[in-house]
Each structure stands twice: as structure tokens, then as C-alpha cells.
Image (cartoon, helix red, strand yellow):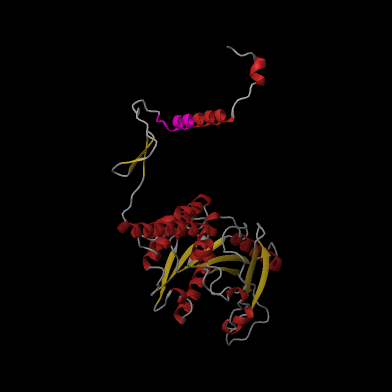
Amino acid sequence: MPYSPAMIAHRRIPMRGVQWQMRRSLHAGRSTRLTSVHPWASIKRKVPLWTSHSQVLVAGRSCRCIHIPPVLLPPVVFTGLLVGLWIWKCVMMVVFQNKIIYMPGLPPSSRRERIADWASMCGGIEWTEERTAAADGTELALAVATVPLPRGRRPVAAVSEPAAAHVYVLYFQEGTGPHVAAPQSPVFGSTPRRAVRWIAEHHERVFGSVGTTRPILLVWGQSIGAGVATNLAATGRVPSNMPIRGLLLETPFVSIRAMLETLYPQKWLPYKYLWPFLRNHLDSWGNLGLIAQVSKVNGSGAPMVFILEADRDELVPKEQSDHLYQRCVDLGLPVEKGSVPVAYHQQAIARGDGKKLAAQAVLKLAQNARDNG
């Protein structure tokens, strides 16, 4: 007998029937979800079926799992740890590369040093500390000294002749030396340009914008600082009244990439493979080419280059200096090279022979700049 809508609304449905219908629907839904979509999978199983080669069949579906014998488990775990540590070290090298390459915190007490702490080793020359700021707001500290000319035994004339030229030496030291009056960041970016601008402003303030004296700016760079010096000379972003007239490269590297390949030649170390991620390449090889090109285009004389190397340098091999010397010869840049005997990387100008050779280099650079106008 068919039921009317009113009869269906008032009819009671037993709870046992409802539960049985729900179980049946749930069982049908599970069977439908686990059934393979492949037409040839006609056999359905409710329990997993373990087969060979670590293959599991579950209700018509197959999945694979990796089975490692207990003997091979420790080597696999330790190999994975080594690979993970190697990748982690590469990431840390890229993120903290400026701290690792320039090492601004070494020696540990370098940030607390003052000029007065080294006054006894300055040979009677008085140094003063000057503070300025770069274009990006970075604090820049300068240690400034004026070196008087020796008077000798002859009496000084009543009327002294004006100096033919004023020589300024801008020195960039590597990160591991003493940091007297040190800035708060490594010397790259706008900091070297701001230092040159400060020298130009100081010269105009003392001697005037128009005068008979000619300023001669020499840039001296040690180790990594040599790359900063060549980079500053290659960019040409210096005041027009203060061009760079000479370069003194002390124990220089060819580039940061060459430095990494020299210090870490092992193939399993990650350092030399991370050069594409460098923020500052400091490529002296390429910078020398730019210096020669700009000099030819402008028709001006190229600055003279003096390379000072240490005979027993434990960090920079002599091939690096030889490459830069030959590069200058090929480009037609005036260049000279000197070697300090029995001197290590940090002792190039610490010994008496090194001091004498460095002083002669400064005189040669200044004389060449004066003769070439």
C-alpha cells in the first residue's frame, strides 16, 4: 500500500533500522574510496596484502616503502647529518659573509683601542681622530696626521718657499689588524668615496679652492684593502679636484674569488663554490682594466701602481702579486714591484726593510704624479 506524505510524516522509523542504514552507507563509502580506479583491478581486499620487494597492496591500491637493513641504518643516518651540516654551513657563509671575510671584531679588543694607546709607536708623529658620515649615514672615523719635512742641520731660511704639492695618503687596512679610530662597518660602498670627499674638503678649508699647491692623492691598500683601493680608483667617483694619482698595493689579492680558491683549495670545502653569492667581489684584476680604459678615454695619465709583497707570505702566494704586475704591464700602466725579505703577511711594513721600502714607494708615487702633472 503506498504511503501518502501525511502518513510518512507521522510514521515512526525504528532506531535500529536507522543505525543499520548508516553502517551500510559508511561501508559502501569506504569501499568506494579505497577501490582502485584502474579497470583491471577487479579484486577488492579489506586487509593489506604484503608482497615481496617491499610492496603493499591495500584494497586494490599499491604503495612502496623503503626498507633499510639494520646494518646500513647508522651509515645512512650519519651521512644525512653530514650533508645537512654542509648545506647549513653554506647558508651561514652566504648570510654572514661580511663578518667572515672582513672580520671586524678581530683582534677582540680592537674596537676599544684609541690613538693614545699607540702613541709610543708612532715615531713622534701626532695623530688626531676625525669623525664624519657617509652618504648612507654610516659613521666614518679617520686618523689624520701631518708629517713635517726634516729640517736637517742647515738653518731654516727666513722666507720659506710654498710647497710644490701636498701629498695625501688614504690607507685601507684589512680587517684583522689594529682598528684605531675604526668605523662601525667594513670599508666598502660609499665609505671610501666619503673619505676622499673629506680629504678634498679639508684641503680647500686649509689651502683654499684656488692656490699654487696641487693636491696629490695616493691610495694605499693592504691585503683585502688593496681591492678597496683599486675599486675606488676604477669607479672614478671622487671629487674633480682630488683625483687618485697613485696606488700602493700591499700583499694584494687578485680578487675575493681568487682569495677563496687560494686559502681553501680542498674540493670538499664549500667556500670557493659560493663566489656567485658574494656581495663585494673586490676584483683588482678587472679594476685595473677599468683604470686603463678610463685613462685612455679621458686622455689623462694613468696612476702609477706599486706592488709591495712579503717574501714569506703565508696567506697570499707570490703568484697573486705576479699576476697583478703582469696585468699592469699588459695594460700599459706604470708599475713597480718590491719584496720585503723574511716577512710574513702582517709583517710587510713592520720590519725595518719593509718600512724603508714603503717610504720609497710613497716618494716614487708622489714624484711620478708631480712629474706627469
Q: Is residue 123 left or right of residue 65?
A: right
Q: Is residue 370 left or right of residue 270?
A: right
Magenta highlight on residue 334: no
Asked whether the viewer can see residue 373, the reply is no
Asked whether the viewer can see residue 232, the reply is yes
Magenta highlight on residue 34: yes
Q: Main secondary structure of the magenta part?
A: helix
Q: Considering depth in this image, is 286 or 23 the residue closer to the camera?
A: 23
Q: Considering depth in this image, is 91 or 291 the residue closer to the camera?
A: 91
Q: Considering depth in this image, is 145 or 33 the residue closer to the camera?
A: 33
Task: State the quadrant of the C terminus.
Answer: bottom right
Kindly give the residue lying farthest to the top in the view shown: 1
Figure check: 296 above or below 321: above
Residue extent of the magenta highlight: 27-36
Q: Would you identify the image quadrant in which residue 54 lies?
A: top left
Figure check: 83 above or below 147: above
